[in-house]
Each structure stands twice: as structure tokens, then as C-alpha cells.
Image: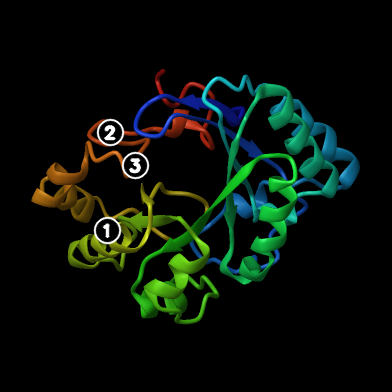
Amino acid sequence: MSVMKRYAVVREKYPREVVLLKSLGCAWNKCAFCDYKNDKAESILECIPFNRQILNKARGGTGVLQIIDSASFNELPMDTLFDIIETCAAKKISTVILEQHWIFRDSFSKIKALFAAHSIGCKFILGLETFDYNFRENVLRKGMGNPSPRELSRYFQWANLLCGAEGQTVGSVENDIRLGLEHFERITVNMFIPNSTVFKRDNALIAEFYNGELFRQIRLEPRVEILDILDARAPDLLGGVGYAEGADNA
């Protein structure tokens, strides 16, 4: 069985360190296209030392640490939260990037205050996937309701978008990217990678996107990362975090 890569340094566009930790599970747990929710610990006794081992890899050279886990940041154990703060203090990390589900938005002020007490700033990433309400809620089952782009950006500075799942169109993907750049500081475009769910990768759509004018315009845009472990045309890799060790060919 391959070992999943859980730490990397990203040096292009937005330099940072990235860690993939484990929680005890995703509170929402209904996203139809996602199987990362299966990457979870069975108990606190497993979770805390596992995450501590991953955090110990951080070097602090970029001053920025992105925290990813199989759920939301709020669902990490409290001990892991304090381990993150201690890691930031020890490695002189001044900014943390935290991924959260929309349902946790009302907790952000308290999280910011906790980190600010240690001179650490926070930015939040939303797994938006698409602005297309019908596809996002009735197909992907994201559980976000129908907030406006302006409301979304009140809470989140960064949005993850999905491209290339069957049922999407190039037009909707390009609209998502334009809206994302209009309303957020940064966006990540994740090309769909086949997994254990019933969703399939639409290779024709992805080829059309890569051959399109918008891709040529944004591929080197500092505010956009385009991730696709299966196609070398994607300019970004996130160091291969979340995939098998060595999958990034770094």
C-alpha cells in the first residue's frame, strides 16, 4: 500500500509549507465526490501523536503554514491546535492557512483571536467547488445553501474550485474562475482525480480547458494555482500532498 504524502514546501506563486493532518472525521460527511473523508483517525490517542509527527517536519523558512485535514480545521483535536501554535512559535511562522467548511464560519473570529494572541495571522480556504448552485448542492452535496459570492468572501480569502468532474461544462468552470478571481484573494483549481466515489473524470472537458484561452491567461497568474497530478500541463502541484509519496515527480 502506498504512503500518502503529508508534508511539502511550495516554492512558486505563494511560498508556504503544507501539512496534511488527520481529524476524527468530517461533521458534514456528505460530499458525494469526496473520499478524503475516509482519511481519519480512530481515536484521539492515535490522532494527536500522528499529527505531531507531521507538524515536526515544518521548517519555517517561508513564514506561512497551510493546514489541511480530512475534514475542517475545527475538527482537529484541541491538542493539535496547541501543537500548531507551538510549531509556529518555534519556527517563526507568522501566517496559517486553514481550510474550513461553510458551516463553521461563525467560529472564525474566535480562531483569529486565538492565533492573534500568539502574533499569528489567519487566512481561511473554502471548498466551494463551484458557484453553480444546482451542481454544487444537488450533485456534489456540499451543504452550503446559496450564499452570494460577496457573502462567501466576507469569511474566506481563498476558494478551492473543482474542474473536470462529469456533469460540469467548460463554460461553468470558466465562469467559476472569473467569479473566484473577482471575489477572493486567491483560488485553487483542482482537476478532478478519479477516486473511490462514482464520479468520473471528464477528460474531454479537461482537454478543452487546457486548450482554451483562459488557461493560457491564468496559468502563470500568481493568484491562481491549477492542480492536476495526472497532466503535466497543470503548472502547480502543491508538492504532491494528498497523493502517494513520489507522485509529484519532484
Callout 1 environment at 10 Å: few (<14), some (14 to 19), or many (20+)?
Answer: many
Position in image of residue 184 (x %, y %): 37, 58
Q: Along the line of sight, which residue is nearer the eye, 84 or 43?
A: 84
Q: Which mark is residue 225?
A: 3
* Outermost residue, right side: 45
Which residue corresponds to the image point at 66% horizontal and 62% vertical from the top-left? 109
Q: Looking at the picture, which amino acid does disc 1 mark?
A: Ile
Which residue corresponds to the image point at 33% horizontal and 74% vertical from the top-left? 132
Position in image of residue 42 (x %, y %): 83, 48
| For residue 246, side relative to residue 85 (left or right) | left
Q: Quadrant of the N terminus?
A: top right
- Is mark 1 in CB contact (under 8 Å) with mark 3? no
- Is mark 2 in CB contact (under 8 Å) with mark 3? yes
User: What's the distance in space between the residues labelled 1 and 2, CA to CA?
Assistant: 16 Å
Which colour style is shown?
rainbow
| For residue 132, side relative to residue 144 (left or right) | left
Which residue is denoted by mark 1 in the rendering? 177
Q: Quadrant of the C terminus?
A: top left
Callout 3 environment at 10 Å: few (<14), some (14 to 19), or many (20+)?
Answer: many
| For residue 51, side relative to residue 138 (left or right) | right
Badge 2 marks a residue whose secondary structure is loop
- The picture quadrant where one finds residue 60 is top right
Q: Looking at the picture, which amino acid does disc 2 mark?
A: Pro
> Can you see residue 140?
yes
Q: Looking at the picture, which amino acid does disc 3 mark?
A: Glu
6 is higher (above) or lower (below) than 138 = above
Badge 1 marks a residue whose secondary structure is helix
User: What's the distance in space between the residues labelled 2 and 3, CA to CA?
Assistant: 7 Å
Q: Which mark is residue 235?
A: 2
Query: Quick one: label 2 or label 3, which is nearer the N terminus?
Result: 3
